[in-house]
């Protein structure tokens, strides 16, 4: 049975790697095609109104905006780019009129750009200064012509880049977001399961520090998943492919991530409490083995619930339980064990007098963990039911 599970896991890993290679290759082809299209369109657009001018600035801007990570970002970056260019060229024009193309003019430009208001970021101020210094010589020779031409080229390139990015396979990051959240849930569920198995095998002292280290490493996965979810949410803004993705509204990664972020706090709390108890020198503070045996089963139930929480919904109508039904069963099983243990502790069957605070901490963490999963599960069920109706 174990070898079969390993074989299935290996096949799944190979399929995931093959899918990532195909996606990466397809992504490079799409980026290349969009870059070529944006460059040609920007060059042609500028050539219509100024055939004698070389539209390098328009092409450069179109390349940047056409391959921005999201349509929303291409619009906001275009606005910032145009604003910075206008500010830099106006600064160059004014400085050239007053001081000419001299070293003093460069110094004034740098000082003014660096102190140009607290609302601008450091990158924006540096961009304004760089554009002003580059445009200083041109502004001194042909002040108004260089200003108008540069601004128009930037505008044309920005508009072309935005249109290409919005109309030609605009980027979406839903798969990346779902994958990051599923990976996070799998790591949490596996850790809970391993803690349960370790407690059942009487390895609290030997394995507890390793559990705490793994629980702390979950912060890295949380940060990565949060970045992916935020990028996925941003990629849906002003995206022409959103209509085609409307069917995925009942599997929102953001809601799942919020639930898992709360679960991670409880997982880390459980691991920390177990380490503290294993390291406590007071013998009467140590947890009873009967409690640990029952708590081990609760953790395994909780691990199964966390993993089932993000499994994709079943589309077949066979007799096999759907992920939602397995999640519901795992939660109910864990809640049953939780209720049983609470009754035994209250009755004095499991607790040692000096360890009441430890029992309370462990039971509270599991209760909150299951409550977070249960609320998120009910929300997802409500969204799915309303979508069906």
Image (cartoon, grey):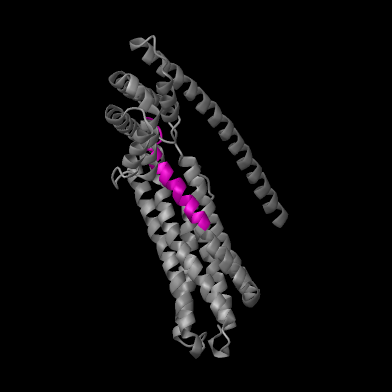
User: Residue 111 occupies which quadrant of the picture?
Assistant: top left
x%, y% of residue 299? 54, 68
Q: Residue at x 52, y 55 (%)?
A: 221
x%, y% of residue 362? 48, 75
x%, y% of residue 102? 37, 30
Q: Residue at x 72, y 54 (%)?
A: 3
Horizontal side of 383 relative to 337 (left or right) equals: left
Q: Quadrant of the C terminus?
A: top left
User: Residue 262 occupies which quadrant of the picture?
Assistant: bottom left
Q: Nearer the viewer, residue 120 or 155?
A: 120
x%, y% of residue 245? 41, 36
Residue 360 in view, yes or no: yes
Q: Nearer the viewer, residue 162 or 284?
A: 162
User: Residue 85 occupies which quadrant of the picture?
Assistant: top left
Residues drawn in magenta: 220-245
Q: Nearer the viewer, residue 99 or 288?
A: 99
Q: Quadrant of the N terminus?
A: bottom right
Q: Is residue 32 magenta?
A: no
Q: Is residue 235 magenta?
A: yes
Q: Is residue 217 above or below residue 341?
A: above
Q: Is residue 341 above or below residue 282?
A: above
Q: Main secondary structure of the magenta part?
A: helix
Residue 168 in view, yes or no: no
Q: Is residue 262 above or below residue 247?
A: below
Q: Residue at x 54, y 64 (%)?
A: 215
Horizontal side of 313 relative to 93 (left or right) equals: right
Q: How many marks?
A: 0
The outermost residue toward the right is 3
């Amino acid at each position: 049975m174990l070898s079969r599970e390993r074989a299935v896991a290996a096949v799944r890993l190979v399929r995931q790697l093959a899918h990532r290679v195909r996606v990466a290759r397809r992504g490079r082809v799409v980026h290349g095609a969009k870059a070529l299209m944006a460059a040609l369109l920007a060059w042609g657009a500028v050539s219509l109104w100024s055939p004698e001018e070389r539209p390098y600035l328009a092409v450069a801007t179109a390349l940047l905006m056409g391959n921005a990570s999201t349509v929303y970002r291409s619009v906001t970056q275009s606005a910032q780019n145009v604003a910075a260019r206008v500010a830099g060229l106006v600064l160059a024009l004014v400085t050239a009129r007053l001081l000419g193309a001299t070293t003093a003019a460069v110094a004034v430009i740098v000082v003014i750009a660096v102190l140009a208001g607290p609302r601008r970021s450091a990158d924006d101020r540096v961009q304004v200064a760089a554009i002003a210094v580059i445009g200083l010589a041109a502004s001194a020779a042909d002040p108004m012509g260089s200003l108008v031409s540069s601004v128009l080229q930037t505008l044309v390139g920005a508009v072309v880049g935005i249109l290409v990015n919005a109309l030609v396979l605009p980027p979406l990051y839903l798969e990346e977001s779902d994958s990051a959240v599923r990976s996070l849930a799998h790591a949490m569920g596996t850790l809970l399961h391993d803690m349960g198995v370790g407690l059942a095998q009487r390895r609290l002292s030997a394995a507890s520090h390793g559990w705490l280290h793994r629980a702390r490493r979950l912060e890295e996965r949380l940060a990565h998943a949060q970045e992916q979810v935020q990028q996925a949410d941003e990629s849906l803004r002003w995206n022409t492919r959103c209509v085609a993705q409307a069917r995925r509204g009942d599997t929102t990664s953001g809601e799942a991530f919020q639930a898992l972020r709360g679960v991670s706090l409880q997982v880390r709390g459980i691991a920390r409490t177990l380490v503290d108890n294993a390291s406590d020198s007071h013998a009467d503070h140590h947890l009873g083995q009967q409690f640990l045996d029952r708590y081990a089963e609760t953790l395994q139930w909780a691990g199964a619930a966390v993993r089932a929480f993000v499994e994709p919904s079943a589309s077949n109508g066979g007799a096999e339980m759907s992920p939602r039904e397995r999640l519901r069963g795992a939660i109910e099983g864990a809640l049953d064990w939780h209720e049983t243990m609470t009754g035994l502790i209250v009755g004095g069957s499991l607790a040692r007098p000096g360890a009441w605070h430890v029992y309370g901490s462990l039971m509270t963490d599991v209760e909150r963990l299951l409550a977070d999963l249960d609320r998120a599960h009910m929300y997802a069920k409500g969204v799915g039911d309303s979508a069906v109706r």
